[in-house]
Image: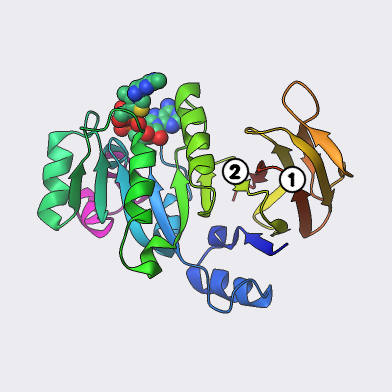
Amino acid sequence: MDVMIHSSNFLLPNPAAAAAADNINGLTSRPRKYALIILNQRLPRMTPLLWSHAQLRVCADGGANRLFDELPKFFPQDDAVAVRKKYKPDVIKGDMDSVRTEVVDFYSNLGTAIIDASYDQDTTDLHKCVIYIHGLSDPQKSNLCILVVGALGGRFDHEIGNINVLYHFSSMRIILLNDDCLIQLLPGTHHHEIHINPSIEGPHCGLAPFGMPSQSTTTTGLQWDLRNTEMKFGGLISTSNTAKGEIVTVCSDSDLIWTISIKKA
Ligand SMILES: Nc1ncnc2c1ncn2[C@@H]1O[C@H](COP(=O)(O)OP(=O)(O)OP(=O)(O)O)[C@@H](O)[C@H]1O
Ligand SMILES: Cc1ncc(C[n+]2csc(CCO)c2C)c(N)n1
């Protein structure tokens, strides 16, 4: 079975350091590239950093209000309009019931593409944004790893909707982030090697099958490793676990959600 390698080097302070770390780890022959999706929740403190790593920036509906209202607060010395012009999203997509008209007007005047998908009341705004990225004709864009900010905490129906998007697009690399932790899907089709950078993440971590139960999961590198262990809701899931070193491996017959804490700066 092929091995998928994961790292959170996008949390390193500058893109050059992240690219260098990717290469040192032998993660990719070329540095990994990212799209950023901004959801409608308070922007985490790492938003400007993730923005600087991203090749493509998309706001899910009311996420554009957050960018407009909250991003200038990261740069209190600077003129708010100048900051908004610098942090211009490529696309705003959703059913457009949350984004304010002044926000749509401001960004569309700067050249942001506005995609009204209000005809679709069966998928969430995050789902609509992932469809947009997945459908891009340029494979360099449609294959980007997607970082999603504002996906955790808040309304539980939205949280489970956001996790459902991970399962829906299980062949894409999508990472949900907030200030405290990140989560991602580890598809059962691969073995996984998670490279942990202790300066930015860990040690607290967890592993759980939100979809199908797992008959057999094996890990290395955790304080409480699993050895051909069954995991299911209503039975064993791994919470409050700890990454012991810099590499964790996971092999499972089922898709699992991996989560690890993010350190305060
Ligand atoms: N409280 C929250 N907790 C987690 N995610 C959220 C929360 N609020 C919004 N989101 C995310 O931000 C996206 C955009 O939210 P927005 O408030 O613009 O629209 P919505 O009408 O509430 O959501 P949707 O149309 O997707 O049902 C949602 O699709 C969801 O992924
Ligand atoms: C079973 C079921 N439950 C809820 C909704 C409603 N819904 C789901 S996603 C979404 C957001 C559209 O932007 C809305 C309104 C549905 N369609 N089907």
Whether residues under marks 2 and 1 lie with C-beta atoms below 8 angstroms apart, the answer is no
Residue bearing the label numbered 1 = 253
Residue bearing the label numbered 2 = 183
Residue 221's label in the rendered image is: none
Position of 156 relative to 13 (above/below): above
Residue 83, quarter of picture: bottom left
Residue 201 lies within the magenta run: no
Whole-angstrom CA distance, mark 2 to mark 1, is: 19 Å
Q: In the visual, does 229 lie left or right of 250? A: right
In magenta, the rendered stretch is 67-87
Q: Residue at x 76, y 31 (%)?
A: 237
Q: Residue at x 22, y 34 (%)?
A: 99
The answer to whether residue 195 is seen in the rendering is no
Position of 168 relative to 32 (above/below): above
Q: In the visual, does 56 lie left or right of 5? A: left
Of badges 2 and 1, the one in the foreground is 1
Quadrant location, ligand no. 1: top left
Residue type, numbered disc 1: Asp
Residue 181 % position (x, y): 60, 42
Q: Which colour assignment does the render follow?
A: rainbow
Question: Which one is nearer the viewer's eye here, 59 or 20?
Answer: 59
Q: Residues within 10 Å of mark 1 (few under 14, many from 20)?
A: some
Position of 160 relative to 249 (above/below): above
Residue type, numbered disc 2: Ile
Position of 127 relative to 189 (above/below): above
